[in-house]
Image (cartoon, helix red, strand yellow):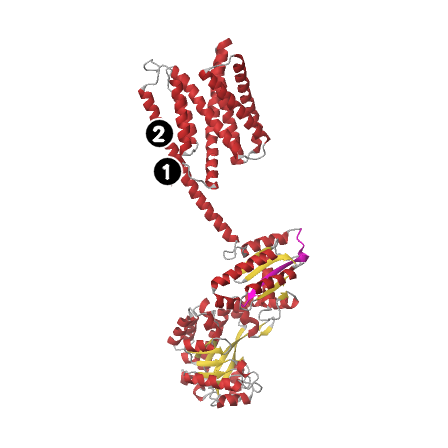
Amino acid sequence: MKEKLREWLGLERQSKYVRDYFYAANMRASIYMSVVVIVLELYMIYYMSTKVILTPITGEAFWHVVDKYFTNYFILLASGILMLLYALRFLYQKYWVKWLSILTLGLAGSVCIYEIRCLVRAGGEGTALQNRILLLAAGFLLIAFSVMLFTGRQDVRWQSLGVLYTFSVVCIDFGIIIATGSYAAGEQVLAFLTMVLFVVCLLTWRPVVGFCILTASYAILYYRLDPLPAPNTGEPGLTESSVINGFTMWLSTLLFCISNYRKTRSQALKDENLEEINAHLRRISVIDELTGIHNMFWFRTEAEKVMNYVTTDVANTVFLFFDIENFKSYNEKYGFHEGNQLLIHMAHHIEEAFAGSLVSRFSDDHFVVLTKQEGSMERISSLSEKLRDLQGEVQLTLKCGAYKPDGHEKDTSLACDRARFACNSIKKHYDLTFRMYDHELEQRFMMKQYIVNNIDHAIENGYIQVYYQPIVSTASGCICGLEALARWQDPEYGLLPPSAFIGVLEEYRQIYKLDRCIIEQVCRDYRNAADAGRPFVPVSLNFSRLDFELCDIVGNLCALADKYRVPRKFLEVEITESALTDQQDFLPSAMKALRRNGYSIWLDDFGSGYSSLNVLKDYQFDVLKIDMKFLSGFGQNEKTQPILENIVSLTEQLHMLSLTEGVETQEQFDFLKSIGCSRAQGYLFSKPMPGEQLWKLVEEGRLDVEPEYRSVNNQA
């Protein structure tokens, strides 16, 4: 209730924005108000001047006219002009208006001189003395504010408010003086009502201030009218109807004042809220929401400016890319909240270390800096120490890649990419924490950009080819399957191995294009073999974890199989162990869709991750593909054979077939056969090759196919 009362009285605490809003609103309103006053007073001065000239008035009569009319006209005109000048300076930054303050100096000065002359010569008493003192005080104030306007170079709020208050007082006093004279002559007090409406309704006042202005104005008017004879009765004193009418007008004006204040305040609060929202949007457009430092939008914009400054020493400038290696493990151990706290601490450490440089968060646990190369290594070392203090029980490493632009480098995004490429080149190299982008990385980076920019062109022009590597049955030694592997036969770079483009396409989320291309080529090869009556065996297709995220890979597989009329048994899907641990949300449903459509599912690279047994527990596979690393050092490491033997035994218990990659010697093959491993794959049988070469070896009898697959037409 107390707060509500304060709000109605206008005594609530206002924010700076609301105060500024009211101030600007009053400055705008004062323009209209002052223009009207100026026009009216110029007309009245002209009217009275012509009257004096046409009807010669001399002596005391002349000074009576000056005293009654011209002094009031001049002071009101001066206050109107000065109010207009201050409002124009504030709203439109018109600083030339100061020269017009000479007009107000002349008008107010002449009034002051005249009033001083009258006070010295004749003195005064009662209302006349009060009027003279008020005019003299207003004149001195206007002179002071005129001097301030002339000498000042910018808007000062208290000066503008001082002029506004002076203008308001002069207007109301003018209305009282003219209304008193009109009432004595038997006329209405319209001048007073007009001026009060001007001041209280055009300008916006707090309700309590408006109440005081209105009450004081009406009280002074009634005080001055009370001794005068009433126009309708001729008897001294205000009539009852005049009091009632005056009270009604006072109340109506007060209610309008309150309504105007509340309406203006409401609009101010709405605009303030909108301004805060816009400020927040502007802030988040350049500020990283988590860490509070700048984001990449701001960095790219500012870096481009810096690189174009003629004062920038490009030879001593470097782009740095920071990556907190093993941050994922930190999140898994301590949770995302603690992980975010670590990022916030590191962000501010980097900002402090490179104070005066451009610093921003790139993404995730990555940061970029544009700074001077001189002294940067010491700062990087200091940041590594601070990261070690924050890491807890998880081993974290701060990796940094650097790119030094040449004198013509303008593309800041490309510069960041090169610094990032340098940083990525030392990931998983625990003895390296810093790498400068050099010629070797330049060649690798150019190749990377070439792959990303040309993958669509390569697919359209048939540069992407399928190479097949046989999978043999350990029981018969015959081919029972093939693995489809991608090769890029580029007209410029020649034959590109998978290691040159698979990782790049995954990084840039383009891998699904390659995998869809391989699926179609395999289906086409089956159809060609079936139509020609040649043998064909089931083919396993490697699906990237991104395939399930970026496209409907299961739908694409089914559509292409239907298009080329490929039986489901001839297409098998390999999913890597790491994909299952990274994409647990939608992969289970995709695997169910594969099974529902009749496809076999293989677990690829078993043993290369840390959660293999969990994967076996949670998912159902038809084939377990044992990673080739198990056969490395086969004859030297005595642990290899018992581990493989137990894995094969486990697959049998889980009703899966086992397949071991990387078989290169007969000894390895014989061992796998002895422990019951179902299938084997490796260079012992054949390296990957185009289908034509593979089937030529079959025709020559150098490779044999399982009897059930020697005629595709019998299986289709």
> Which residue corresponds to the image point at 49% horizontal and 75% vertical from the top-left?
610
Q: Residue furthest top?
A: 59
Q: Characterize the local packing of mark 1: few (<14), some (14-19) or many (20 or more) Cα atoms within 10 angstroms.
A: few
Q: Which residues are magenta?
A: 311-326
Secondary structure state at the residue bearing disc 2: helix
The answer to whether residue 314 is above or below residue 175 is below
Amino acid under disc 1: Leu
Please identify the quadrant where the N terminus is shown.
top left
Q: CA distance from mark 2 to mark 1?
A: 20 Å
Amino acid under disc 2: Ser
The answer to whether residue 615 is above or below residue 370 is below
Q: In front: 716, or 16? A: 16
Q: Which residue is mark 1?
A: 5
Q: Which residue is mark 2?
A: 252
Residue 320 belongs to the span the image colors magenta = yes
Task: Tell me where residue 588 appears, x and y as whole percent.
Answer: 41, 72
Task: Tell me where residue 487 appears, x and y as whole percent.
Answer: 54, 75
Q: Characterize the local packing of mark 2: few (<14), some (14-19) or many (20 or more) Cα atoms within 10 angstroms.
A: few
Q: Is residue 253 left or right of residue 464?
A: left
The answer to whether residue 51 is above or below residue 664 is above
Please identify the quadrant where the C terminus is shown.
bottom left
Task: Tell me where residue 707 appears, x and y as whole percent.
Answer: 44, 89
Label total for image: 2
> Which residue corresponds to the image point at 63% horizontal and 54% vertical from the top-left?
307
